[in-house]
Image (cartoon, helix red, strand yellow):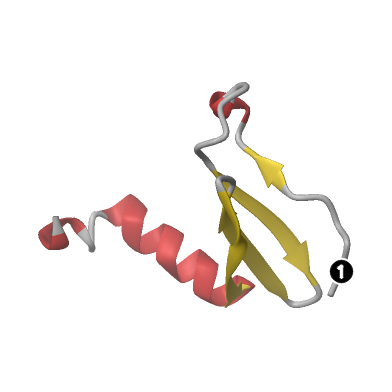
Amino acid sequence: MSEQAWQKSSYSGAHDECIEVRAVAEEVEFRESDVPGVIVRATRATLMDLLDAIKTGDLDHNV
């Protein structure tokens, strides 16, 4: 597994309750900073599809 550094949003400031992300080969990994042992992986294409769905409101009916 890559040792590339995890990144978090600058909006998080000094708080440890945020989502961290890193790119590893052809995948993107996510984790919650206060639960670093749980990692979710997705392809870059899947991530782009998710972000597009969020931006267009396709997932709003699930709230």
Identify which amino acid the numbered label 1 is placed on. Ser
Assign a secondary structure to mark 1.
loop
Q: Residue furthest right?
A: 3
Give the residue at mark 1.
Answer: 2
For residue 19, side relative to residue 25 (left or right): left
The spot of residue 7 in percent (x, y) is: 71, 44
The spot of residue 46 in percent (x, y) is: 51, 75
Q: Quadrant for residue 29, please give it.
A: bottom right
The spot of residue 3 in percent (x, y) is: 88, 62
Q: How many marks?
A: 1
Residue drawn at (74%, 77%), measured in percent from left and top? 26
Where the N terminus falls, by quadrant?
bottom right
Residue drawn at (55%, 46%), measured in percent from left and top? 34
The front one of 13 and 23 is 13
The front one of 31 and 62 is 31
Residue drawn at (34%, 63%), measured in percent from left and top? 53
Circle 1 Cα neighbour tier, 10 Å, few/some/many (<14 / 14–19 / ≥20) = few
The spot of residue 18 in percent (x, y) is: 52, 40
Residue drawn at (82%, 50%), measured in percent from left and top? 5
Q: Quadrant for residue 22, please give it.
A: bottom right
For residue 44, side relative to residue 56 (left or right): right
